[in-house]
Structures are given as C-alpha cells and as structure tokens.
Image (cartoon, rainbow, N blue to C red):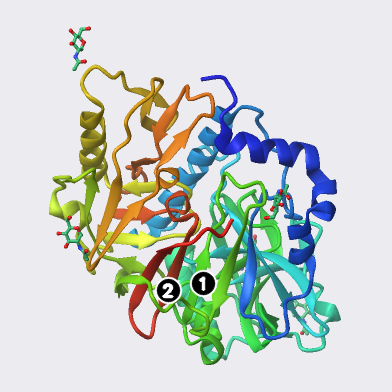
C-alpha cells in the first residue's frame, strides 16, 4: 500500500513544493492569468488543485492511498446528491460532523459586473442554477463579487417569471421556499453539506470576450458548510436557467471540454463554447432528455466490453427510463465512474475472470478490484448507441509507479439515499478526451485529445 504511486504523487509534490511560486513561474499559469483572447471562445480549464489554481488547497494527506480514498468519499456524496435529484428528494448529508464535499473539481475564469471582476468558478454540467458569493456574504471565502461596485447589478423582483423558474428548479434540490417580503426574489438552497442563501440577481457575465447581459444568477449572502465552491458555481446543465441556455444566442447550446489528466502536473484543459471550432470528425451518440431530471446530459449506454467479450449486464441496469430517471449521464463533477450494482458487478467479474483464477484480488478503499502483482490488462470499451469508446488504460486504471497496486478505477453506485438507478460516466474516464455536448443536434461526441 505504501510506495510512491505516480498517479497523484507527482501532482501532490508539485502542489506541496511549488505552492505559490509555481503559479507565477509556470508558463501555463501565465497563460491562464492573461485576459481571455479577444475573440477566443476557448477557455483554459484547471483542476481545482492545479499549481495554477488560486483555489488550490494543501493536500490533506501525504500518501496516494489516502488521497484516492478522499477523492472517492467525495464522489459518494456527489453520487448521493445526483441520485437524490433523480428521486426528487433533497439531499440530507450523512454524518454532518465530518467534512463532506461534492465540489466539482474543475474551474474556469469568469468576468462579472461592470467594470468586470474576475472569479474562478467551478464547472458543473449537471446543475442549472449558477451562483457566486457576493459583497457582505457571511460565511463565504475572501474573494467575492463586489456587487455594490457594479453599475449593471440588480436584484430581481418576485414578480419576474424567472423567480418562479428558480423556485421550481430548487424544489428538486432544496426545501422549496420563496421569500418575497422585501419584494426581491430570495432563496435558500442546499449543496452537499452547505446551506446557501441569497437573492436572485442579474448582471453582465462573460466567459469569453462576448458578455451575456442580464445574466440571472444567485448572489450568495450567507453560506454554511464546506461544499460550496469558494468562488461560485457555473451551471452548464441543459435546463432553461443554465448558463448555456441563457447564452443560447451566443453559443447555441453547444460546448465541449477536454478535462486535464490527473497525472499531469499542469492540469490544464479547455472549455470551448459554441459550434465554431468544435471537432468535425468526432464519434457521436444521441443525447437524451429525461424529464425526470432535465438538467442532466443523458446518453444511452448499451453495453460494456472487457477485451473482446461483451459483458452480460441485465438490460434493466442500463436502460433509460424517463419515468424513474434511470439511465446514464455524463458528469464533470464526479471523479470515478459509477455503474448501478448489477452492471458494475458484471463488468468487474469479467475483468477479474481475465486475470485468471490464481491472481489474488485485493481492495483499496472503495475500489474492490486491485492487484499487487503484474497483470495483463484487457481493454475496456464503453458501448453507447452508435458509438464505441475504447478507453486508454489511464482512463480505467489507477496504478502505482512502483507497480505495487493497480486498481480498476470504477465502482458501484451507492445504495444510499435511494437505490441508485443512475450510471455516471465521470471525469477519470473523460480525461484527455474531448466531450462535445451538442444540444441542437441532440448528440454527444467523444474524441481522444491529449489536452494535458
Ligand atoms: C507544464 O507544461 C509545460 C509545457 O507543456 C512543460 O514544459 C512543463 O514542464 C510542465 N510542468 C510544469 C510544472 O510546468
Ligand atoms: C439587493 O439586495 C440586497 C439584499 O437585500 C441589498 O443589500 C442590496 O442593496 C440590493 N441591491 C440593489 C442594487 O438593489
Ligand atoms: C432562508 O433562511 C433564513 C434563515 O437561515 C431565513 O431567515 C430566510 O427567511 C430563508 N429564506 C427563504 C427564502 O426561505
Ligand atoms: C494455479 O496455482 C496452482 C497451485 O499453485 C497451480 O498448480 C496451477 O498450475 C496454477 N494455474 C495457473 C493457470 O497458473
Ligand atoms: C460496437 O461494438 C460492437 C461489438 O464489438 C459492434 O457489434 C458494434 O457494431 C460496434 N458499434 C459501432 C458503432 O461501431
């Protein structure tokens, strides 16, 4: 279990040693801190703990094992959160004393207000409502949007239709409460273990050189707990309140990202907005809309191949079902792919079978298929409707550089708080791939790209 395990140790070393200095000396950081190119709709995406990230935290643990376990326990909470959205119940965190996070891992630079102020906002493609910490916020981090200094900032009144939209949206994620005594639309919401309160507001918001005027977002004035991304959340979901919907005239509900590799010390990828510049030759699968949870980007995962064998998975484990919300989503905020129990067990058993009966299987935290001896690794192919994606080994294994431990980097969906019906294709499986979300043409594209 000990030993230097390269997947995170390199980044960990950098995070520990470069800390502040790295941000200034790394040429990629300089690029990141420059203003966005005049007509560029391609933004740099950083892992929140990248050397370039102003939000990076000292890693809590010095061993790879502990960091992986930490990442997976955060995942469990996000999975519970996503599953509860499907179930239409609010998320009640378990063990409230412990630090529970389901903060998305990737950040981009955004400009808000007039004159523009910079915030490092977290990408979340499974949420629709964006929010940022505002002036006077109690319990927020030190960097907030100084709404009082923006000449284009306004509170939204209760009478506006968008106030009802926000309330209807929050019904699914939080205790639905609208407080209109003061004439302005205010809300409380839960996000992981955080309680967040604020007011619905509008201001100019920009990711590229093209600002979105009158962008609706939540101005956070009170926050408790530790789950909220410190400088706010950029909602890239499919619903009508999301950034992509509000910026539809600019970007036509089309975007792609390439998430940087967890192995890369630079951790830099890209977010590309709009149909322009998207790959023309890319494998695609139909994008599905599930009214049970209209924010999510659902796709039809029809099977999984381990080596040449198509794993026998009960069809119900993968089936898309608009009545229950069951199916498969592509999520940027979960780290490791989760399949519903029956599907995961079948995939794992086939993977183990390929290793031969004499190879001892061990476990590591939430990973139950690990090996401490050299193994011959089969390929893994995710079979979507009309699109097979054969994953490079880095996308389905966690390996130690001393080759003491190799694990299958997937797990079963948690059984809490509801029996999960959701398969989640997560960021470990997406890294170094361009993922295209093309709503007008109802398709999701996947192409390998070495973006870090
Ligand atoms: C980051 O990337 C650059 C160029 O891709 C490379 O030269 C450098 O060694 C990498 N690592 C750091 C810590 O900057
Ligand atoms: C918006 O609402 C907040 C909280 O009620 C208040 O402090 C602020 O002055 C309002 N801003 C404007 C521009 O009305
Ligand atoms: C939000 O919660 C605070 C107390 O934490 C309460 O005073 C306020 O009225 C609530 N607002 C809404 C819209 O429920
Ligand atoms: C498995 O181990 C047993 C006992 O050590 C040995 O007799 C057998 O040949 C091994 N089988 C394979 C396929 O390596
Ligand atoms: C995906 O792989 C399966 C099994 O090998 C094959 O039957 C199918 O035609 C492939 N689909 C595409 C779109 O290539």
Residue that appears at 41% across and 71% down: 295
| Relative horizontal placement of residue 191, taking residue 356 as reference (left or right) | right
Residue 277 position within the rendered picture, expressed as x and y whole percent measured from the top left? 52, 81
Residue 224 position within the rendered picture, expressed as x and y whole percent measured from the top left? 67, 53
Q: Nearer the viewer, residue 302 or 284?
A: 284
Quadrant assignment, res 142: bottom right
Q: Against 175, is 294 above or below?
A: below
| Relative horizontal placement of residue 76, taking residue 341 as reference (left or right) | right
Q: Against 89, is 428 above or below?
A: above
Q: Looking at the image, how many numbered discs can be counted on the residues?
A: 2
The answer to whether the residues at label 2 and label 1 have Cβ atoms under 8 Å apart is yes
Quadrant assignment, res 375: top left
Q: Sequence order check: which comes first, mark 2 or mark 1?
A: 1
| Relative horizontal placement of residue 144, taking residue 325 as reference (left or right) | right
Residue marked by disc 2: 437
**Callout 1 secondary element:** loop
Residue 104 position within the rendered picture, expressed as x and y whole percent measured from the top left? 56, 56
Q: Nearer the viewer, residue 221 or 151?
A: 151
**Callout 2 secondary element:** strand
Residue that appears at 59% across and 75% down: 179
Residue that appears at 57% across and 33% down: 6
Q: Residues within 10 Å of mark 1 (few under 14, many from 20)?
A: many
Q: Residues within 10 Å of mark 2 (few under 14, many from 20)?
A: many
Q: Which mark is in front, 2 or 1?
A: 2
Q: Against 37, is 402 above or below?
A: above
Residue marked by disc 1: 236
């Amino acid at each position: 279990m000990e030993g230097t395990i390269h997947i995170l140790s390199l980044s960990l070393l950098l995070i520990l040693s470069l800390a502040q200095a790295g941000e200034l000396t790394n040429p990629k950081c300089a690029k990141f801190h420059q203003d966005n190119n005049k007509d560029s709709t391609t933004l740099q995406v950083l892992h929140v703990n990248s050397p370039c990230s102003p939000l990076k935290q000292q890693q809590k643990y010095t061993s790879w094992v502990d960091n992986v376990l930490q990442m997976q326990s955060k995942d469990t909470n996000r999975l519970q959160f996503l599953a509860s959205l499907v179930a239409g119940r609010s998320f009640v965190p378990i063990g409230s004393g412990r630090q529970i996070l389901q903060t998305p891992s990737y950040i981009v630079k955004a400009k808000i207000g007039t004159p523009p102020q910079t915030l490092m906002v977290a990408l979340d493609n499974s949420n629709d409502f964006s929010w940022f910490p505002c002036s006077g916020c109690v319990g927020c981090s030190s960097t907030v949007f100084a709404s009082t200094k923006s000449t284009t900032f306004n509170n939204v009144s209760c009478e506006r239709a968008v106030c009802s939209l926000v309330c209807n949206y929050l019904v699914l994620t939080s205790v639905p409460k609208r407080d209109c005594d003061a004439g302005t639309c205010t809300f409380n919401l839960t996000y992981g273990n955080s309680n967040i309160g604020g007011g619905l507001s509008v201001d100019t918001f920009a990711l590229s050189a093209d600002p979105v005027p009158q962008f609706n977002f939540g101005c956070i004035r009170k926050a408790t707990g530790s789950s909220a991304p410190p400088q706010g959340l950029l909602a890239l979901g499919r619903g009508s309140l999301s950034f992509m919907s509000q910026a539809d005239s600019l970007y036509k509900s089309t975007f792609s990202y390439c998430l940087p590799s967890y192995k890369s010390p630079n951790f830099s990828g890209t977010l590309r907005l709009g149909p322009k510049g998207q790959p023309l030759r890319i494998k695609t699968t139909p994008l599905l809309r599930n009214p049970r949870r209209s924010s999510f980007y659902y796709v039809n995962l029809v099977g999984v191949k381990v080596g040449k064998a198509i794993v026998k998975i009960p069809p119900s484990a993968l089936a898309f079902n608009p009545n229950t919300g069951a199916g498969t989503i592509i999520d940027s905020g979960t780290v490791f792919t989760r399949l519903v129990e029956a599907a995961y067990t079948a995939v794992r058993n086939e993977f183990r079978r390929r290793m031969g009966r004499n190879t001892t299987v061990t476990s590591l935290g939430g990973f139950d298929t690990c090996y401490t001896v050299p193994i011959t690794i089969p390929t893994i192919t995710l079979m979507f409707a009309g699109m097979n994606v054969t994953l490079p080994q880095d996308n389905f294994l966690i390996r130690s550089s001393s080759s003491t431990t190799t694990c299958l980097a997937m797990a079963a969906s948690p059984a809490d708080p509801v029996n999960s019906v959701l398969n989640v294709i997560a960021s470990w499986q997406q890294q170094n791939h361009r993922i295209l979300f093309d709503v007008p043409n109802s398709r999701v594209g996947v192409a390998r790209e070495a973006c870090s």
